[in-house]
Amino acid sequence: MPELPEVETVCRGLARVMTGNKIKAVSTARKDLRIPFPRDMQSIEGQRVTKISRRAKYILISLNKDKILIIHLGMSGSLVIKNKGEHYKPAKHDHMVIDFDNGTRIIFNDPRRFGLVALTHVQDMPRHKLFRHLGPEPFDKKFSASYLGNKLKSRKAAIKLSLMDQKIVVGVGNIYASESLFFAGIDPRRKSKSLTMPEMKKIVAAVRKVLTAAIRAGGSSLRNYVQSNGELGYFQRHWAVYGKEGQKCKGCRCDIKKTGGVQRLIQGGRASFYCKIKQK
DNA sequence: CTCCTGTCCTGCCGGC
DNA sequence: TGCCGGCAGGACAGGA
């Protein structure tokens, strides 16, 4: 379930093996994932990778001639690196393979096909369908308490749902929304418009803290952001509340026989987790 | 504009 | 043992 920290970690891994190298060949194993593969996919052959970056949960691979190859991992997508000479045994759900001049091979595997691959130009990015409606990056100055207050002032949806809304702020998915609200001390069911300025401030700080810690965990638990099997980015972590229904939350001093421990509920069809003692 | 639900897709797990 | 339902969730479409 890649959210911003996982995508960021994948990008750092990709940057190490792709930057400066020339694409020799690209092949796709089917016509589409969530959307069709670009018709002009083959046009990236012969292009050199100039930069790897990230916008929201999208991986941006900048190429010569201002082309940008866009990859979104969806829910189940992963990228695997094979170094020169390493044997590649095609696996189920390998949908795209990119070969580089230096022998490096990148494989995009995605069982559930919620991911996507697209191709665009630098100048088309601001108006691009995928990017047009995205809110600010969580680490951008624009994502502030006053910005949030303004965005949420007319929204009665639960704050958990607003945090996951990519039009409001990008990169926060189901897991980090629960985690952020835990550290902000805010009940996920609170109406967005009911939050006070000090609470907005706490949320901004908590989102940044949670994402920063996760990115750091990715960097420190993986050698060069790559697992031993060549898979990029994913790493083991433990959560403060996520997935811990009935258990102690992080730093819990309660008798959970009395409190029931971490609560689980469904919001917008997704599981939320929170501590009813610490989050109000 | 915001809200709310359904949809896509496969793997996994628990219950019977 | 096998079948079935439910769940996992990122992003968008469409109707209210």
Image (spheres, coloured by chain):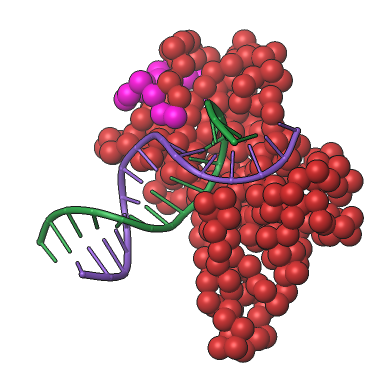
Chain colours: A red, B purple, C green
Residue A81: quarter of image: top left
**Viewer-closest of A265 and A71:** A265
Does residue A7 appear anywhere in the picture? yes
Residue A68: quarter of image: top right
- The reply, left or right, for residue A257 in relation to residue A144 is left
- The reply, left or right, for residue C8 in relation to residue A92 is right
Image x and y of residue A185, in percent: 75, 67
Does residue A144 appear anywhere in the picture? no
Image x and y of residue A128, in percent: 64, 19
Q: Residue at x 66, y 26 (%)?
A: A131
Q: Quadrant of the C terminus of chain A?
A: bottom right
| A38 within the magenta span | no
**Viewer-closest of A67 and B2:** B2
Q: Which residues are magenta?
A: A20-34
Image x and y of residue A272, in percent: 58, 60
Q: Residue at x 86, y 42 (%)?
A: A150
Q: Residue at x 74, y 49 (%)?
A: A156
